[in-house]
Amino acid sequence: MSTDSSGTHDDRQEASDDESAVAIARRQLLRAAKHLDIDSSVIERLKHPKKVQEVTVPVEQDDGTVEVYTGYRAQHDSVRGPYKGGLRFQPEVTRDECVALAMWMTWKCAVMDLPFGGAKGGIAVDPKALSDEERERLSRRFTEEIRHVIGPTRDIPAPDMGTDPQTMAWIMDAYSMQEGETIPGVVTGKPPVIGGSKGREGAPGRSVAIVTREVLDYYDRDLTETTVAIQGYGSVGANAARLLDDWGATIVSVSDVSGAIYDPDGLDPRSIPSHDEEPEAVARHEVPETLSNRELLALDVDVLIPAAVGNVLTDETAPEVQADIVVEGANGPTTTAAAEVFRERSIPVVPDILANAGGVTVSYFEWLQDINRRYWSLQRVNDELESEMLDAWNDVCAEFENHDVTWRDATYIVALSRVADAHDARGLWP
Ligand code: NAD
């Protein structure tokens, strides 16, 4: 197994200083920039968002009172095409978090070579505390407040935490009503009946499975002799588990928020309900052994896939990891300090912006289908996703070998060089 040699002691020191999302995103940008010859003014611009829209969203509640919420849409960079990224309805949503996540979307779209830039947005609200009618009014009013900055050629939102295909349907309807024509391409992740793509829901898990298969092949490991532990059994975790199982891997452990189950002989992922099918049902499944989520992370397996939430692999848990390879299914599961631990221990970590990029890639397919008013079969979606993932994987492999860096740095090098080259070609206006 080749080792990663970039990074210094200073990185480790710096890593423990500021783990805010924006600080991590900027540090990663500077790390990748070190390997490339990029005009410093371009790097300076990329450290900041192009625009952040902050809006006040008044919503009439079912009891007749009016609640006032704050919403954001952060747009990071659009040099390669319209902004693209999710919308979160979550109490913790902040301006800074949206900015950092928008930066990640710029790199994710660029590494996949999609003609999009990065954006993220959301409303600081607990969607579970709202009725369906209140959520609908909230979604429609938010759409009106950000209508002038979104659109199929400007900025295309998608579902994220606390939002779903129904939210996207309300946004698409509100936008279309105000524009006077049906415009399905303004959002992706819609229900298929109004222009959503087949295969969108399973796409992030599918890309995680494809990348896991490819990284095993890179290290001459046989997928059919591979054991896998997956934290989180939602859209990403369950879809990845089922595909890897179909392809011959042995899924020995999966978990949800209430705990993990373990069978060294292998679980049957199709008999375990995903979060969508039956929330928090994993730990109730009949198995030889149950574990905590922390014990799952420390299992002696070939591949560990954190696919639940961010920041689970830290300077405390990373030293306990016994897996040979980590593939990031969740967004941001590895802190900067943990990434340094893995680098020192020569444990390859395939980063989120590559591994779970199937979601935004099929969103791109959805946008193409909407613009062309011509819809694809599930087979075509899956075939095209496979081909896009292999192209991106091969581009990242080339940089991994060229620069002798971590997989994360190689992925950022691919993404940043594409964005920087586009800035270079377009120049600075005026
Ligand atoms: P989900 O809500 O469908 O499932 C999340 C799963 O994680 C559930 O099984 C839940 O019980 C479990 N979980 C929650 N908190 C946990 C904790 N603290 N410890 C262990 N398990 C916990 O979510 P999802 O759509 O599968 O997303 C999972 C991750 O993947 C998130 O980081 C998300 O941002 C990222 N992601 C999702 C998509 C997508 O389109 N669904 C795309 C790219 C990235």
Image (cartoon, grey):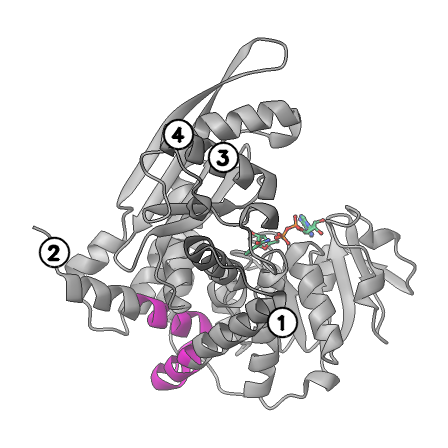
CA gap between label 1 and label 2 equals 40 Å
Disc 1 to disc 3, C-alpha distance = 34 Å
Q: Mark 3 highlights which residue?
A: 173
**Amino acid type at image mark 2:** Leu
From the viewer's perspective, tell me whether residue 202 is left or right of residue 50: right
- Residue holding disc 1: 209
| 420 relative to 225 in the view: left or right | left
Q: Amino acid at mark 3?
A: Asp
Q: Is residue 237 visible?
A: yes
Instruction: Specify start and end residues of the magenta stretch as a single range.
Output: 395-416
Crowding at mark 3 (Cα within 10 Å: few <14, some 14-19, many 20+): many
The furthest residue to the bottom: 220
The residue sitting at the top extreme is 64
Disc 1 residue type (three-letter): Ala
Earlier-in-chain disc, 1 versus 3: 3
Structural crowding at the residue carrying mark 2, measured as other residues with C-alpha within 10 Å and reported as few (<14), some (14–19) or many (≥20): few
Q: Is residue 286 left or right of residue 241?
A: right
